[in-house]
């Protein structure tokens, strides 16, 4: 049967044959089989998401491909809370964004499970219906529609969590549950002020905590000793000095 064919090709690593085979009138059934296996197996032992992504890309179904990679990234954030998992999650979101950028703007959206089924994504709101036209928010609680800017926000959060984890592997950011406001606090604590400002501007958060922390660090520099100066070079190097230094030339 069709399911056995898909399973055997996967087990034999004949993935190119599986992707390129012309499934006349059986396309949806094949997708359903691979989707089921992708969601049922452990991400650390098998990866059917990338196979499903290749399947859709080969057929130029970029919206479906983007949906697959976004779902993969969300599962990684919940189930693989490690530094490699964060790196893979960021790459998945980038792949999803690239897929939507290949679609005309009015159709560049994907459908995802409601936030209650995964984790709450701040700032998300349904935008368009299945015809790509502007529509009111759906009354049901089972789906939400994400547009390109929503994915870009998620990608930004993933990149920030990855950066914080690389800065300190014990950081709370590696859990993947920190809100944007909590991430701002972690960023200023790590001295990553440029990234904190970008996050505040994206999510329309107050910049006050950023400037308070920056002011405190500058005061410490003025009255601190060599140890404080040595520490200062680390957070100064992590930021674009041209964005915080004002001279007559760049006023």
Image: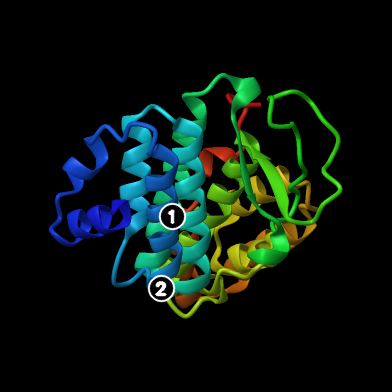
Residue 27: percent from left, percent from top? 39, 38
Spot the residue most to the bottom.
170
Q: Quadrant of the C terminus?
A: top right
Position of residue 165 measured from the top left corner of the image (x, y, whole percent): 45, 69
Residue at label 1?
Answer: 35
Q: Which residue is mark 2?
A: 82
- Where disc 1 sits, the SS reads helix
Mark 2, secondary structure of its residue:
loop
The quadrant holding residue 152 is top right
**Other-residue count near label 1 (Cα within 10 Å), few / some / many at <14 / 14–19 / ≥20:** some
Q: Residue at x 82, y 43 (%)?
A: 138
Q: Which sits in the foreground, 95 or 109?
A: 109
The dot on residue 152 is none
Location of residue 27 with respect to 114 vertically, above or below: above
Q: Residues within 10 Å of mark 2 (few under 14, many from 20)?
A: some
The residue shown at (72%, 65%) is: 116
- Asked if one can make out residue 213 in the rendered structure from this viewpoint, the answer is no
Q: Position of residue 20 (x, y in %)?
A: 23, 35
List x then y, in percent, for residue 250: 60, 26
Quarter assignment of residue 215: bottom right
């Amino acid at each position: 049967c069709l399911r056995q064919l898909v399973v055997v090709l996967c087990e034999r690593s004949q993935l190119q044959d599986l992707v390129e085979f012309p499934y006349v009138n059986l396309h949806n059934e094949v997708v359903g089989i691979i989707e089921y296996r992708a969601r049922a197996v452990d991400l650390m032992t098998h990866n059917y998401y990338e196979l499903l992504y290749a399947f859709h890309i080969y057929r130029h179904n970029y919206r479906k491909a983007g949906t697959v990679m976004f779902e993969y990234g969300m599962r990684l954030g919940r189930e693989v809370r490690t530094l490699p998992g964060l790196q893979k999650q960021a790459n998945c979101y980038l792949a999803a964004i690239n897929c939507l950028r290949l679609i005309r703007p009015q159709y560049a959206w994907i459908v995802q499970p409601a936030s209650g089924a995964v984790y709450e994504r701040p700032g998300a709101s349904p935008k368009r219906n299945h015809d790509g036209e502007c529509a009111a928010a759906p009354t049901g609680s089972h789906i939400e529609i994400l547009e390109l800017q929503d994915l870009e926000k998620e990608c930004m959060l993933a990149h920030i969590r990855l950066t914080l984890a690389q800065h300190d592997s014990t950081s709370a950011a590696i859990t993947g549950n920190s809100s944007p406001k909590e991430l701002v606090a972690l960023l200023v604590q790590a001295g990553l002020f440029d990234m904190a400002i970008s996050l505040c501007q994206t999510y329309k958060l107050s910049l006050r905590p950023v400037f308070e922390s920056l002011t405190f660090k500058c005061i410490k520099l003025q009255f601190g000793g060599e140890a404080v100066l040595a520490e200062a070079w680390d957070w100064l190097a992590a930021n674009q000095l041209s964005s915080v230094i004002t001279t007559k030339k760049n006023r």
